[in-house]
Image (tube, helix red, strand yellow):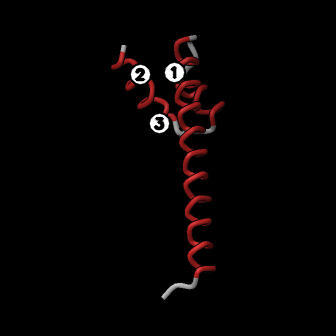
Amino acid sequence: MMALFDQERAVEQFGYEKRQEGREEGRIRQAKKTAVNMRKRGSSLDENAEILELPADTIRTWVKEADALV
């Protein structure tokens, strides 16, 4: 049986991990938005990838997804 202290520690760790996941999701969401806006302004995929420090294939996928929604 898990001691109360261990349970509290597990719950605390779970909360920390969830906050980290949320932050990462927020960073990705912002990077997608930035990539799409830069592309609309005429930036190349390679330029976007360099500035956002992400693979060009990732940028290409995001731009295609955004174009499909329009």
Residue farthest bottom in this picture? 1
Residue 59 placed where, x, y %?
49, 31
Q: Is residue 24 above or below residue 35?
A: below
Q: At 55% from the left edge and 51% from the top edge, which residue is drawn?
A: 21
Q: At 56% from the left edge and 67% from the top edge, which residue is drawn?
A: 11
Q: Of label 3 and label 2, which has the lower sequence position?
A: 3
* Disc 3 to disc 1, C-alpha distance: 11 Å
* Disc 1 to disc 2, C-alpha distance: 7 Å
Q: Which is nearer the eye, 18 or 8? A: 8
- Judged from the image, the secondary structure of the residue bearing numbered disc 2 is helix
The amino acid type of the residue labelled 1 equals: Val
* Disc 3 to disc 2, C-alpha distance: 12 Å
Q: At 36% from the left edge and 13% from the top edge, which residue is drawn?
A: 70
Q: At 63% from the left edge and 79% from the top edge, which residue is drawn?
A: 5
Horizontally, is 69 left or right of 17 in the view? Answer: left
Q: Of label 3 and label 1, which has the lower sequence position?
A: 1
- For label 3, the residue is 58
Q: Of label 1 and label 2, which has the lower sequence position?
A: 1
The amino acid type of the residue labelled 2 equals: Ala
- For label 1, the residue is 36
Q: Which is nearer the eye, 3 or 70? A: 3
- Judged from the image, the secondary structure of the residue bearing numbered disc 1 is helix
Q: Is residue 25 above or below residue 65?
A: below
- For label 2, the residue is 66
The label number, if any, that marks residue 6 in the structure image: none
Residue 67 placed where, x, y %?
38, 18
Residue farthest left in this picture? 68
Is label 1 in contact with label 2 (beta carbons under 8 Å)? Answer: yes
Horizontally, is 62 left or right of 25 in the view? Answer: left
